[in-house]
Structures are given as C-alpha cells and as structure tokens.
C-alpha cells in the first residue's frame, strides 16, 4: 500500500504563564504567513487583545487569525462554545469591516448552555461560603477558583460525563437536541433545587431547544468536521498555526491545580483539541510577559503588594480582557517559566511588555523557592503546596529608556538586553521575539 505523504508546516503559539501574555498579538503578527489559524482549547473565558493600526480588537472565541484576510479561522473540537457570544463577536467584527467568511467551527466542539453559566456562578458562591462542621467551622482547603463564570468548567464536566453533553453538531438535529435537553434539564433542575432551594434555577427544555435550533441555523454554514478539514489542508501542503487559549500554568493536568482552567491549555492540548497528531507541530513559540500576572485565585509566588506592583499594573494596563478585573502583578518567575517551557516543549520564546519595565531601577527574577522542606529550583505543580513557596531572587540593573520605538535587539539598552539574555540562559530556550508595545509594528524579531 502506498501512503499519501503529508507535507505541511505546523506551528503553535502558547502562553507559558497564567494567561494574558500577549498571545493574540503574536498570532496576529504571524497569521498572514499561514493558511489557517486554529483554536484548540478553552472558551469565552479567554481574552486576546490585538491592536492593528491603532485599533484594538478584543477576541474571546474567534481565533486571532480572523484579522488576516484570506486565512481560515478554525475553532477546533477541544473548544467549548457559547454560541450566542460567538455570534455577537462575529457581528462586532463584521460591523468593523472584518471579513469573517473564513470562519469554521468543529461539529464536535461542545456547547456552553445557560445552565452551565448558572452552575458556574453557584459553585463559586458555595466555595466562598464557610464550611460548617457542626459546632466548629472547618477551614476550607480550596477557596473559590476565581472563574470568569462563563460556564466553561461545567461545560467541560458535562463533556466528560457524555450523556449530559451537547455538541455543536447537535444544534443541526432538532429531534436529537430536543430529546437530549428534555433529559438534561430534568437533571439540572433537580440539582439546582437541591443546591439552592430558596431560589432554584429552572430551565425549560422546549424553550432551550427552540433557541438553540435557531442559533444552529445561523451557524450551519460554518460548521464542518474540522479533523478532516485540517488533514486535507496538511495533505495539500498548507501551513497551520495553532493558537492556545489560557496558558500552560493553567493547564488542568500540569498547572497550579486546582486553581486552573478546565482544559489542556499547554501545547499538549493541540492533539486532542484539533485531531492533528502532535508530531506534526515542529515549532512551538512560548509567550511570556517580562513580569508575571495572574487573575483569580491560586498561588503566585512572586506577587507584589507594594507601590512597584501598582506601578507595573498601571503602566501595563493590567486589567482582564474578559472580566475587566485588575490582574495580580509580580516579578518574573523563572522557576515557573522553565517548567512551563518544558511541559509545552517550547522551541523559542516571545517576551512581551518589556517596555512596561522601563523606569524600574532594579529588576528581580525568581531563580528558586524556599519551601518548608528546603530550597528547590523545581516548580511545585500543586496550588495548595505552592502557596508556601518563598521566592529566591536574583537582582539585575533596570533601564529607564523609552524602548517603544526600538525595532532591533541591538538597539535595546544594555541592561534590557542582559535581562533577555538571562531569561534565555536560565530557561534554556532562545528568545526569538520581543514586544515593546501593543501595536503590530512594535515588535522585534531576532
């Protein structure tokens, strides 16, 4: 038997921290070099901000490649989709003159339903309430996760439970959808009545079916079996760029569990989230801020609670694209970064927001942790144990120059170059791109 060869270039852009690293900007910068851009995980809890020609675009479900004409923007099977939000996002883009005709949605992607969002909010409320252990209140080991309350976790939970899951393809089959929703709503209503008896949520299966069938008709032209589509593109020698949502430190298996997202947000999620085998991806660009940020609950060893942290937050406009919440800010954690690069198999790094550090007389880098058991240079992938980590810092000279107009690595101030080179040497991965501002043009390619 003669096997047809697959001759294509596949690359990936993934976050190596806790999200918000600037992946959208890099994907937008690279997208025109590829034939398709693919989202493989997450949902509307992700937020990518892209600035083109001074105009800012906030994308949550639509791949950033949508801003590059002629490039297919594909939502893979590993994404959970809130169809109403997707339609709103597409309309906003169309109203701004963006061509969305290249949009494709996997028929196997799972649907975020209204009851998922209600369940997400209820779970967070229950986790913030004290646990009553009788006469003595019991300390909670896990507090609220700090989700975006977009229903992402419950949607992924139903995906794993299978019988209570709705897939995008189901929206095109009214009879199947009605049968599923009748059973699911009966179960969900029972659960809500038990967990919140004073004001239980009640979902009507017939009404939901009608609403989802109408949405399905609007989405139908975009729905395909994307596993075959991507295989066809690869066999035709087309190039594919995978766009990760969230980030490696939020990976459900390898992040700071339980303070993580509900999908494989590292590069390890590409295969199951798209149907493309992992060996097809030969370039993995790990995106990292020049400092650390995090939104929501969970440990962040280098977090700053002083005026320096506030200054960095203000200069970096560190407020969530999806939630608007102020991001927690800290020094760059090289221990966490080296671990994340290992997990995602990063072949090169992209350092973003280097310009935000301008004006700091000293820059600190965490190179180890002091733990109750002793000093370690290994990351602790446990959100409860990591809370005890005290960072061991290495201090470097800062820089004061405005670098937003710099377009080559050699033009950077010596101390800024030294900072980048120290990151490279510690992590063991070369830095290929440095971002010195939000716009496409404010990028240094080495």
Image: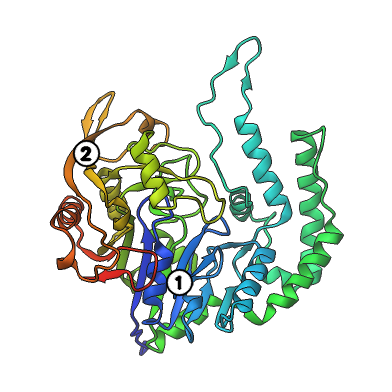
- Identify the image quadrant of residue 210: bottom right
**Left or right: where 190 falls relative to 241:** right
Q: Nearer the viewer, mark 1 or mark 2?
A: 1
Can residue 3 be seen in the rendering of this structure? yes
* Residue drawn at x 64%, y 39% as measured from the top left: 123
The C terminus, quarter of image: bottom left
Kindly report the distance in space between the C-alpha atoms of the residues bearing marks 1 and 2.
Answer: 41 Å
The N terminus, quarter of image: bottom left
First in residue order: circle 1 vs circle 2: 1
**Left or right: where 203 falls relative to 171:** right
**Observer-nearest of 267 and 146:** 146
Give coordinates of residue 157: x percent, y percent: 60, 50
Give coordinates of residue 227: x percent, y percent: 51, 75
* Neighbourhood count class around disc 1 (C-alpha, 10 Å): few under 14, some 14–19, many 20 upward: few
Rendered view: 201 above or below 134: below
Give coordinates of residue 270: x percent, y percent: 42, 65
Instruction: Name the residue tied to disc 1.
Output: 54
**Observer-nearest of 187 and 288:** 288
Mark identifier at residue 441: none
Instruction: Name the residue tied to disc 2.
Output: 377
Mark 2 residue element: loop
Rendered view: 85 above or below 34: above
């Amino acid at each position: 038997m003669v096997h047809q060869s697959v001759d294509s270039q596949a690359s990936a852009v993934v976050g190596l921290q806790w999200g918000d690293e600037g992946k959208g900007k890099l994907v937008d910068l690279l997208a025109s070099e590829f034939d398709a851009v693919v989202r493989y995980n997450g949902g509307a809890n992700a937020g990518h901000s892209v600035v083109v020609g001074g105009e800012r675009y906030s994308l949550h479900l639509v791949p950033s490649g949508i801003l590059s004409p002629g490039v297919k923007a594909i939502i893979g099977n590993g994404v959970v989709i809130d169809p109403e939000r997707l339609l709103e996002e597409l309309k906003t883009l169309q109203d701004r003159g963006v061509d969305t005709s290249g949009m494709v949605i996997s028929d196997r992607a799972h649907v975020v339903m209204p009851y998922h969002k209600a369940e997400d909010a209820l779970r967070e409320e229950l986790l913030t309430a004290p646990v009553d252990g009788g006469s003595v209140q019991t300390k909670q080991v896990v507090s609220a996760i700090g989700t975006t309350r977009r229903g992402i976790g419950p949607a992924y939970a139903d995906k794993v439970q299978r019988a209570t899951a709705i897939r995008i393809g189901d929206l095109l089959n009214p009879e199947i959808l009605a049968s599923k929703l009748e059973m699911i709503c009966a179960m969900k209503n029972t659960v809500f009545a038990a967990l919140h008896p004073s004001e239980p949520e009640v979902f009507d299966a017939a009404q939901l079916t009608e609403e989802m069938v109408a949405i399905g008709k609007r989405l139908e032209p975009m729905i395909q079996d994307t596993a075959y589509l991507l295989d066809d593109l690869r066999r035709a020698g087309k190039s594919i760029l995978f766009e990760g949502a969230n980030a490696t430190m939020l990976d459900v298996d390898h992040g700071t569990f339980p303070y993580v997202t509900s999908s494989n947000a590292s590069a390890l999620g590409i295969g199951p989230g798209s149907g493309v085998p992992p060996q097809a991806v030969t370039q993995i660009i790990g995106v990292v801020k020049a400092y650390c940020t995090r939104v929501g609950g969970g440990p962040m060893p280098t977090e700053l609670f002083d005026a320096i942290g506030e200054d960095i937050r203000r200069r970096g406009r560190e407020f969530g694209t999806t939630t608007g919440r102020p991001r927690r800010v800290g020094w760059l954690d090289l221990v966490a970064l080296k671990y994340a690069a290992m997990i995602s198999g990063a072949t090169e790094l992209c350092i973003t927001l280097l310009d935000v550090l301008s004006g700091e007389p000293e820059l600190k880098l965490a190179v180890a942790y002091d733990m109750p058991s002793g000093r370690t240079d290994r990351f602790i992938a446990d959100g409860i144990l990591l809370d005890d980590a005290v960072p061991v810092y290495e201090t470097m000279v800062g820089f004061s120059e405005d670098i937003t107009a710099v377009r080559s690595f050699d033009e950077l101030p010596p101390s800024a170059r030294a900072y980048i080179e120290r990151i490279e040497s510690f992590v063991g991965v070369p830095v290929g791109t440095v971002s010195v501002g939000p716009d496409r043009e404010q990028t240094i390619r080495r």
